[in-house]
Amino acid sequence: MNPYVVLGLAIFSEVIALTALHYADGFNKPLPIVVVVIAYALSFYGLSVVLKSIPLGITYAIWAGLGTAGMVIVGLLMFREKLDLPAIVGIIFIIAGVVVLNLFSKGSVA
């Protein structure tokens, strides 16, 4: 399977885990805790597979950057969080950084 597809699935799993963590109420609710553990296990497994093809620094930058952007979207849509201008600019920089890594870095080629 394409390592970028696996990385996308790892990022999606991370977003699911963090969303469930929000509902875990300080680890007091069992079902969200189970979702957190399973989703993080899937995410880290996906990362371990990706690291066979893409360097660690590039993998982590993409995972963290797109995971952050994904959580911002979840926060906006599910939790009605608001973004101010500095937050919007920061998210744009994160996404731009991921794009630059993928388009111009020789280390990101699988």
Image (cartoon, rainbow, N blue to C red):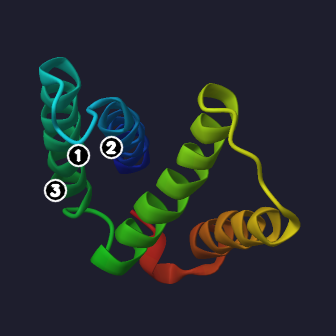
Q: Does 98 sit above or below residue 17?
A: below
Q: How many numbered dots are placed on residues in this image?
A: 3
70 sits to left or right of 100: left
Q: Which mark is residue 10?
A: 2
Label 3 element class: helix
Question: Which quarter of the figure is the C terminus placed in?
Answer: bottom left
Q: Residues within 10 Å of mark 3 (few under 14, many from 20)?
A: some
* Residue linked to disc 3: 48
Tell me, yes or no, whether the two marked residues, 2 and 1, touch with CB atoms within 8 Å: yes
Q: Which residue sits at x=53%, y=57%?
A: 68
| Residue 44 horizontal/vertical position (percent) | 18, 51
| Residue 80's disc number | none
Give the left or right position of residue 107, taking residue 68 as reference.
left
Crowd rating for badge 2 (residues with CA inside 10 Å; few <14, some 14–19, many 20+)? many
Mark before the other along the chain sequence, 3 or 2: 2
**Amino acid at pointer 3:** Ser
Q: Residue at x 56, y 45 (%)?
A: 70
Could you say where residue 11 lies in the image, as x and y percent from the top left?
40, 45
Quarter of the picture holding the N terminus:
top left
| Mark 1 Cα shell of 10 Å, populated few (<14), some (14-19), many (≥20) | many
Report the residue marked by disc 1.
46
Coordinates of residue 94 in the picture (x, y in percent):
65, 69
